[in-house]
Amino acid sequence: MSTSGRWRSFVAHGTAVVAALLFITPLVYAFFSALKPSREVLLAPPALIGSEVRWGNFAEVFTFAPFTTYIINSFLVSSAGVLVVLFVSATAGYAFARLRWRGRDVVFVLFLGTLMVPQEVLVIPMFVVMQWFGWVDSYPALIFPWAFTAFGTFLMRQFFRGIPYELEEAARVDGAGPVRAFTRIVLPLAGPALAVLAVFTFLNYWNSYLWPLIAVNDYATLGTLPIGLASFSSQTGTRWDLQMAASVISMIPTTILVIALQRHLVKGIATSGLGGR
Amino acid sequence: MKNRERWHALGFISPALAGLSVFTALPVALAVIMSLFDWPIFGDREFTGLGNYRTLLTESPDFWPALRNSILFTVLYVPANLTVALVLALLLGPRLRGRAVFRVLFFIPVVTPMVANALVWKLVLQPEGLLNGLAGEWFGITLPSFLADRNWAMIAIVVMSVWAGMGYNMLVLTAALEQLPTSVLEAARMDGAQGRHLLWRVTLPLISPAIFFAAVMTIIGSLQVFAQPQLLTGGGPGNSTIPLVMFIYDTGFKFQDLGLASAAAWLLFVLIIGITALQFRAQRRWVHYEH
């Protein structure tokens, strides 16, 4: 490598390291603030470590508010949401990709059209629909309303179209109907697409904030992690130590998920494409 | 045979069709109807025609400021997000050692709950917090109280949001850069294209479809901003950081006026569709597609 090349490489690595350090500073600060005695969090001059290291703050979060319930609820709602989305998207995606029926393309365009309507526009009438169903303050209200997004159907359709027809036709010739061709041939091949959809859906449910805020009033039994954390922060006021401990706890599950999936990150974004922030 | 396939198709599609009818088509229709009514959460509704729209545009003290705030947020947030994302995507290229670790790091806030991200930044930005504290300690400067200052609150929200959100676009652009045909880049290099010239004349035009996609999605997302201002400033000071979605939420559920909130939601929808349509028109000028 030439001298100028080596110099450029050194600058690039240095810039990346400095940017990364600046980037994680808020998180590091939050973590160490979670370990301080409450009075010392906002003491000047800022210090990394207080007069004592209180790991007990993390435990106190759970006695202060029902965080175990929040976490269980988030897991329940997110997992149920993933199951519904996978089922609905795979079946509809199959009908659009592999079956021939009149009006298919028109219906597909209508499906895609629903993607243009953002959740924020629908939350008000959706609340009224929940009132009609008697679903205000219930798990179904947290699970079903946003499980029928056309995004999943679109993703599965695109993937199914890439599977060679010959595989399915062989089974059809042997007398299998579309249902068996779907469950025995096509679905087992769709693992990667289903995985991408599952991860995206899980994260969307896990981080959802506006809708649970509207659909749930009884936080103690039905609160999910984001709204539990937000109400915890308004209840505890200036207990920054506990708020930071709770925030750090809330960040752990999804952070683990991303680190576990890091090798598929870029590819997953490239294949799913949509669903930006 | 053909006929049976049609029935099978109906079977396969009916879960999605039923769900979209009940949870998308019905609310869309309901939103139109509700916007024409005085519709409280509990109690009697009353038809008021275009009354809600008139109230929004002429009487409501917070609607115009909320619209302005949403647009201001978008104007500040989108270019900042895309610039940081692009610089990082270019920096964390194939020749950087440890790029996978850096990418995961910059992506983490995208998947952590926004509420947690916002609370962390709320602490950082306190008048006695890390930022103001270090500025005073190291440089002897007294910084403004960012979240309580009319001129700074929105900027603080934008900075926090870029920190939390740009990792997504960084990966979208990384994916685009990784798919660039090396032959084209090699040919350009052989022709003497280097450094800045290579970047502006070859690389960026080649990934312009990805940049366009990221811009469209980010603009749509930023017009829907809610959690960050709600948690960092509560819309304040005054109404200087209330975005449209917060206005809709407050109108509907704090003031329990679902009709007025629906009318505001419709105007938000029109705004989003309008801006997206404009972008698709403008893309011909700068987006370069392979044929």
Image (cartoon, rainbow, N blue to C red):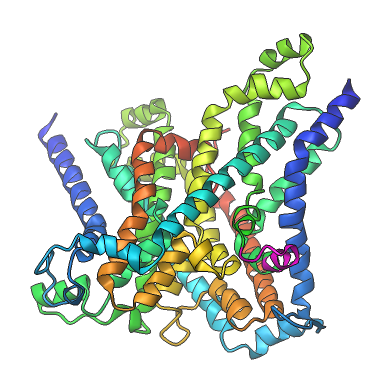
Vertical placement of B207 versus A22: above or below?
A: above
| Magenta-drawn stretch contains A212 | no
Residue drawn at the location 33% of the way across and 56% of the way down: A249
Quarter of the image with the N terminus of chain A is top left
The magenta segment? A127-137
| Magenta-drawn stretch contains A133 | yes
Q: Quadrant of residue B135?
A: bottom left
Q: Is the magenta stretch mostly helix, strand or loop?
A: helix
Number of on-image labels: 0
From the top left corner, tell me how far across and down residue B194 is, in percent. 29, 38
- Residue extending farthest to the front is A63
**In this orientation, does residue B55 appear?**
yes
From the top left corner, tell me how far across and down residue B46 is, in percent. 81, 84
Residue drawn at the location 79% of the way across and 12% of the way down: A175
Q: Nearer the viewer, residue B290 or A258?
A: A258
Vertical placement of A5 versus A73: above or below?
A: above
| Residue B226 located left or right of residue A15 | right
Q: Which of A234 and B133 is in front in this view?
A: A234
Vertical placement of A12 versus B74: above or below?
A: above
**In this orientation, does residue B287 appear?**
no
| Residue A235 located left or right of residue A157 | left
Q: Which of B173 and A140 is in front in this view?
A: A140
| Residue B25 located left or right of residue B135 | right
| Residue B57 located left or right of residue B191 | right
